[in-house]
Amino acid sequence: MSPRLPFVFTLFILAFTSIVSGCSGIPTSTLAPHSGEARIQPTPRSVGSWSIKRSLPRNTGGPAVGAINGILYVAGGTEQGYAVPDALDTLEAYDPSTNKWTAKAHMPTARSYSAAGVIKGILYVVGGVNNNVPSNAVEAYDPVTNTWTTKAPMPTARALLAVGVINDILYAVGGWRPLRFLDTVEAYDPKTNTWTTKHYMPTARCNLAAGAIGGKLYAVGGSRSGDGYLNVVEAYNPATDTWSTRASMPTARSDIAASVINNVLYAVGGYNGSYLNTVEAYDPSTNTWTVNTSMPTAREDLGTGVVGRRLYAVGGYNGGFLPTNEAFTP
């Protein structure tokens, strides 16, 4: 999400540059490594491979993505940016077995830069933004009936957040709302349709990514005013409601996406003054990072999801919004 976008953002940028620069990709400074400096391969290796798949039906930045029963679902997003009233309410379903996209029931609330998690075969889309107004909307999609249901709103309206699911609870972390970068952590239980506030994240930030492994949620990267692009990695343990700092990500960046395959978190793409095709993999069992084969298309504001142990990187922005769909096999 970035004022590198067309002129529609100009007035917003002039009014809020000092506040939102960290969450809009404006270079400020590079954050020094946090405690637990990353241990990585000394040089990039050809780890894993990429292939080009059928593009999204439209150019899309900032989508929410989740996978259910072998199908990748891409909800919402934008074709123009966050400060104009053009957020998408679309839901597109991609079947890797046929390499085809199918339009599904429209999401009730049009929004971009939301986040999604899957619990028991249901896709939950939370937060987002439209016309520069953050949302607290929570809507659940059932692919069996192709219907949406409105759920209890998230306590904190926000966009540019990240989510992860642990033991059928969805955790929403970080994000942005006007004049604030958030350390907020809120947990949603679909059984009771209720939200609970949890211990705040140590590093307030937006444009981050997250993934759940072994009962912990790992929040990686992002941005905030004054610190520029972050390489910080923090782990949340819901059993103790506590956070700990882990090995820093090798490449400081924001506007990234992440997914988990075989208990390894893959951080993909992003921006740190340049559009990135970087792919770095974090193994929490060893607290180490490995540099993987670069993504074919450098971009920020993409979404990722996993089907059959293959990561799909969809949409994004690199000077224009993209319909790109590329698949990574570790």
Image (cartoon, grey):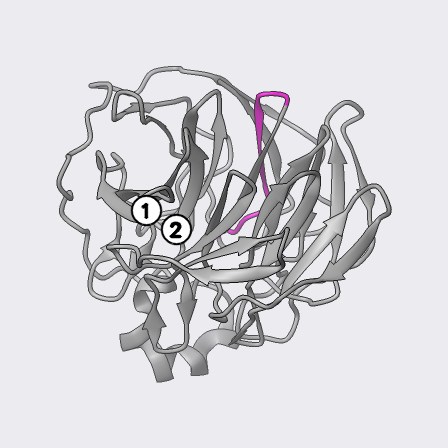
Contact, mark 1 vs mark 2 (Cβ under 8 Å): yes
Q: Percent position (x, y) of residue 318?
A: 48, 50
Can you tell which quarter of the image residue 97 is in?
A: top right
Residue plotted at (15% across, 43% down): 33
Q: Is residue 115 magenta?
A: no
From the image, tell me which residue sits under label 2: 208
Left or right: residue 266 compared with residue 90: left
127 is higher (above) or lower (below) than 125: below
Q: Is mark 2 on a helix, strand or loop?
A: loop
**Which residue is more in the foreground, 200 or 17?**
200
Tell me how far mark 1 sits from mark 2, CA to CA: 5 Å
For the view shown, which residue lies furthest in the right direction? 145
Residue 153 in percent (x, y) is at 59, 68
Residue 79, labelled with which disc? none
In this rendering, is residue 318 above or below 309? below
Q: Name the residue under label 1.
A: 221
Q: Read off the magenta span.
A: 308-318
Residue at point 38% right, 64% down?
24
Lateral position of residue 141 relative to residue 188, left or right = right
